[in-house]
Amino acid sequence: MFEIDPNSQSNLGEVTTSHVHLDLAVDFAASKLTGTATLELQALAHVEQIVLDTAHLIIKNASLKGADDSLETLNIDMSTVHNLYGTALRIALPTPAVKDTILSIVISYETTPKGGAIQFLGPEQTLGKKHPYLFTQCEEIHARSLFPCQDSPSVKISYSASIRVPKPLTALMSAIATSSSESDSGDFTVFNFEQKTTIPSYLVALVVGNLATAKISDRCAVWSEPETIDACAWEFAEMEKTLQTAEELITPYQWGRYDLLVLPPSFPFGGMENPCLTFVTPTLLAGDRSLTDVIAHEIAHSWSGNLVTAKNWEHFWLNEGWTTYFERKIVSRLSGEDARQLSCVIGETDLQESIEFYGKDSPLTALVPKLAGVDPDDAYSTIPYDKGAHLLYYLEQYLGGPDVFEPYMRAYITEFQGRSIGTDDWKDYLFKFFEKTDPEKVKLLEALEWDKWLYASGMPPVKNEYDERPQKVCLDLAGRWLDAADSENYAQFKRSDIDEFSTMQRVIFLGRLAESAPLKAKTLAEIDGTYQLTGYRNSEVRFSWLALALKSNYMVVVDAVIDMLSTQGRMKFTRPLYRLLHTCPDGRELAEKTFLRLRQFYHPICARMVEKDLGL
């Protein structure tokens, strides 16, 4: 059962899903979805039962659909409950199915508020304050709390859906909208969707709310609540250009539309690469387009992750390492190689911090960790992103630079698109490609210590060399501040010191100061007074400043910390701020009280992780 995917209870080796149709009604009053999931499955062997993943679903019945659309009720068993992976839904077939038999199973069910996939928001949690809102987040193993499924990225499905929502709300999905119609009563709208390109279950996504849209190009639009649509349209006006740059770098875009949805602030991630409709956090709305690198990352997922998918969560780096590598290549083409180098430097720092958090000997710091008996959410960190991108950057340089590596990169995507693969598949093709195109490179590949790169804990075995020049100006400024802290000679500094800095340079500047924390309160007061960081609109810079202050037990910023914790739920910011506040001598009780007060504001995934961080 766990052989193909250690985090799924489905009988993946006996049967596979090819298509899912969801017919669901949204009930905001009860915070649930009700309806049916129809699964088209193919027997891979002689099979007597179908085992699906569920979590906190109420399963009413399951039926076998005949060629004439007749329904035969089937026996179900939900007695197998796993504390991490949910409840196995065992569906007994009336007669065993032989290999290649196609089965259509209709499951009537409803979701419950305990499920991790859906966050229901009351009107007071939205910008408009008038209408409720819901959104889903299925990565990594939460699709099973949205619909019964083979919740493993080893299985790729097409899907269609009919979603009934109360007027005047709009439903969107990670699919192409095909039609909509009013109910007979006039109280509801039914929205219909189709996703013809096969995807893993974690990419099924739904949002329902009072939504407005603004066209960016013929294939790109932005969606948000009406109150912020103009700001969103301006912030993300260059997404078509970014998409075109990605196509030039990799291969033509295959998903039809690329729309962007800006969610309410409790969304727990920077972005989520749901096909046709990327979800992003409103913390990207900096007002100056300075944080749109996240969009390059999510666009890159249209190839790595969505087209070529890791077969289970142990190989997550194939999604995120490749995407981070692609993101930085896209940024280089849009903003220059200096921007790529700075991003690599920040990634290296983030990688070191993640490894320190888990401990350098933790098996979860391996590029390919073992996740049997582990909740993939607990293994989520920057490690697969930055350790994976580190390896790919190293290979690019080691094998001869972009001119050598980029043809391989495109061939890799073309070879595996539409498939779910493991690290061995990736590595085998790397050797195979260069055996055909440049056999001398194979000797270089054979010389690498692959076990250390892929399976060893801690930092990568070889340190990458990045261009020092783009970060020199920010490191020099940090050095001047550290020198001035000894003499208290602060008159030399002025606001214009950082006017020409990019966001990444400002983050590197503050990160360098944080390496020397704790700093004196006087020094921190002068830094804030000079650069006005506490009220900074750019969320990355504001977070970096607050983290530096908390590392120095500079509690003058505590109101700003609480404000940031209260107004957004992005885990990149929220978890470290709680951890840092919790470790301050005067902050432990405040961190716990603040979290308990705000718990319902956060997405269930974020709330559970912060709870673990604080030991509650």
Image (cartoon, grey):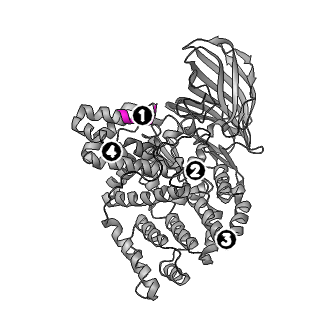
Q: Which tag is nearer the camera, tag 1 or tag 2?
A: 1
Which amino acid, by three-letter code, is at mark 4?
Leu
Q: Residues within 10 Å of mark 4 (few under 14, many from 20)?
A: some
Query: Residue at 55% of width from left, 54% of height from top?
Result: 358
Q: Earlier in the sequence, mark 1 or mark 3?
A: 1
Q: Residues within 10 Å of mark 2 (few under 14, many from 20)?
A: some
Tag 1 near tag 3, CB within 8 Å: no
Q: Nearer the viewer, residue 409 or 533?
A: 409
Q: Earlier in the sequence, mark 2 or mark 3?
A: 2
Q: Residues within 10 Å of mark 1 (few under 14, many from 20)?
A: few
Which amino acid, by three-letter code, is at mark 2?
Ala
Q: Earlier in the sequence, mark 4 or mark 1?
A: 4
Q: Which numbered circle lies on residue 587? A: 3
Which amino acid, by three-letter code, is at mark 1?
Asp
- Callout 2 secondary element: strand
Query: Residue at 50% of width from left, 30% of height from top?
Result: 198
Is residue 129 shown to the viewer in this render? no
- Callout 3 secondary element: loop
As drawn, 119 above or below 339 = above
Asked whether 569 falls inside the magenta stretch, the response is no
Query: Residue at 30% of width from left, 38% of height from top?
Result: 446
Where is residue 277 drawn, in percent x and y? 52, 43
**Disc 2 from disc 3: Cα separation:** 41 Å
Name the residue beneath numbered marker 2: 212
Q: Which residues are magenta?
A: 420-428
Name the residue beneath numbered marker 1: 424
Name the residue beneath numbered marker 4: 249
As drawn, 494 above or below 201 = below
Q: Quadrant of the N terminus?
A: top right
Asked whether 424 falls inside the magenta stretch, the response is yes
Which amino acid, by three-letter code, is at mark 3?
Gly
